[in-house]
Structure formats: structure tokens, C-alpha cells
Amino acid sequence: MTDQDPIAATRRWLERAVIGLNLCPFAKAVHVKDQVRYVLSEASTADALLAELADELTWLNDTDPAVVDTTLLIHPQVLVDFHDYNDFLDQADAAVDALGLEGEIQIASFHPDYRFAGTAFDDPGNCSNRSPYPMLHLLREA
């Protein structure tokens, strides 16, 4: 998907897959109200992504949910290997805790090569968490 705009591709995936296939019953409402924030990360290292993640978690927490309810942090240049991405998720959750946002914001994970533990790569169940680019979904718990 390197020839596409990552935000446009992600928006199309949200509309066609997530909403179109009703993979998430909450996605349509925030999409229709234009409350989804799409952030394209320029990070090329996991440390840089972690810093951007902390900034975005803080921004989302400080923003009125009626304006932005959820953020998709798209990072096409870093953690393209699923195993590296999966390992990073512990650091992402630790950032939520360090910012005192546990119970306020959680992180859902999406990756082009997503694979649940104990499944074959081509298991259809993995498709629910496959996206056009690696991304972190920052999701308000309320």
C-alpha cells in the first residue's frame, strides 16, 4: 500500500471493513459525527513513536469527546514487522499507565499482518485486526 495516502487508505478501510462489515458497533456513530482523528506519524523508531503516542494520549484526554472521541495513530515507517509491533504494545500500555490514563483510554491494536496467538497466519479470525498500515487506536473507555 506504499503508493497510497495512509490516511485516505485508513479512512477507506474504516468505512468499508470496520463499518461496512459491522466489525465494531461503535465505529459508525463517531465516523458520521466526524469525531475520529487520523494522525500520521513520521516516526522512524519505536522511541519516537512512543513519544508521539504519549503526546497523542495527552491531547485526546484533554480534548472534549464531542469534538474528538477516538484517534487512529497510523505509523507506516516503524514497527512494520508484526512481532516488533506486538512487542511494542507492552510499552504502549505502560505509557497509558504512566500518564495516569488507565481506565480512561485504552489502546486497540491493528496491523496488516495481525495474528492472534495460536492461530495460523491465514486464519480468517485475524482479519478483524488487520489494517492497511500499522496503527494504534486510542479509544476512550467511557
Image (cartoon, rainbow, N blue to C red):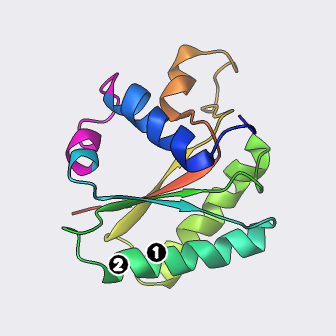
- The percent position of residue 111, horizontal first and vertical second, equals 62, 40
Residue in the image at 66% along x and 56% along y: 75
The local secondary structure at tag 1 comes to: helix
Q: Is residue 56 left or right of residue 78?
A: left
**Is disc 2 surrounded by few (<14), some (14 to 19) or many (20+) residues within 10 Å?**
some
- Residue 30 shows in the view: yes
What residue would you read off at disc 2? 61
Residue 125 bears which disc, if any? none
Q: Is residue 2 magenta?
A: no
Please count the marks in the image.
2
Residue 128 in picture, x, y percent from top left? 48, 29
Name the kind of residue labelled 1 in the image: Leu
Query: Quick one: quadrant of the N terminus?
Result: top right
- The answer to which quarter of the image holds residue 82 is top right
Q: Secondary structure at mark 2?
A: helix
Q: Which residues are magenta?
A: 20-30
Report the predominant secondary structure element of the magenta stretch. Answer: loop
Distance from Cα at disc 2 to Cα at disc 1 = 6 Å
Amino acid at circle 2: Asn
In depth, the one of 136 and 117 nearer the eye is: 136
Q: Is residue 54 above or below residue 127?
A: below
Residue drawn at point x = 46 percent, y = 75 percent: 57
Residue at (64, 31) in percent of width and height: 115
Q: Position of residue 116 (x, y in %)?
A: 60, 32
According to the picture, the residue beneath numbered tag 1 turns out to be 57
The image quarter in which residue 66 lies:
bottom left
Examine the rendered structure and indicate whether residue 24 appears above or below residue 69.
above
Is residue 46 shown left or right of residue 67? right
Q: Position of residue 6 (x, y in %)?
A: 61, 47
Residue 101 in sight: no
Looking at the rendering, which quadrant does residue 71 occupy?
bottom left
Determine contact: label 2, label 1, CB under 8 Å: yes
